[in-house]
Image: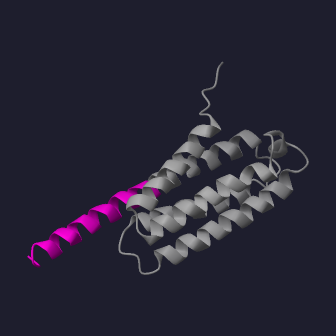
Amino acid sequence: MHLFVIPHGFLVALVCAVALLALWKGGWRTRALSLAQVVLFAAEPFFCHTWACWAGPERPLMLWRLIAEDSAMLALCLVCAFRADRYWVFWTSSLSLLCVITDAMGLMPGLTSWAFASAAVVWGYLTEVTIAMGVWSEARAGAAQRRFLTDGGG
């Protein structure tokens, strides 16, 4: 049996592409969240050089670090969700909460590293999708506002 595995570099490329889109067309919320994702992905190689650290004796320490990082991301999501006028922020906040819960579940002794990593990757991809939806939503709203202002208010 051969398992299909998406290379980690693809997720890193997606994070960078969404960050560039957010810097180009996004609002402050999409910029803040996408740049936070870039910082988290950039810091990862400094803490874990191989996949063996997820299965080895360092796993609990790695999980506590992930819980701290994902909790900081959740806090940023909640700050962005405060008085937000778009739904994508709430989706991103929900996925960030799922990341924190997955990290906490990783501390359970019966959970395999494969199950933990699979869930973390799924939440990572979905988070990037929701941030990209936010860029699209904010770009559309900005274009509509510019049209409204140039048409003389209706």
* Front position in the image: 2 or 6: 6
Please state if 36 lies on the left or on the right of 82 as rendered: right
Report the magenta stretch's main SS. helix
Residue 49 seen in the figure: yes
* Position of the C terminus by quadrant: bottom left
* Residue reaching furthest to the bottom: 83
Can you name the residue that lies furthest to the top here?
A: 1
Image quadrant of residue 2? top right
Colour scheme of this structure image?
one colour
- Residue name at image x 61 percent, y 46 percent: 121
> Is residue 107 found left or right of 10 in the rendered image?
right
Is 15 rendered above or below residue 139? above
Q: Position of residue 115 (x, y in %)?
A: 69, 42
Asked if residue 149 is among those painted magenta in the image, a careful observer would answer: yes
- The residue positioned 16% from the left and 68% from the top of the image is 147
- Where residue 87 appears, as percent x and y from the top left, is 38, 67
| Name of the residue lying farthest toward the right | 57
The number of numbered discs placed on residues in the rendered structure image is 0
Q: Is residue 134 above or below residue 79?
A: above
Residue 90 location (% of width, % of height): 45, 67
Q: Is residue 93 visible?
A: no
Front-most of 115 and 30?
30
Q: Is residue 42 magenta?
A: no
The residue shown at (37%, 60%) is: 25
Residue 4 horizontal side relative to residue 54, left or right: left
Classify 58 as above or below 50.
Answer: below
The boundaries of the magenta stretch are 131-154
Q: Quarter holding the N terminus?
A: top right
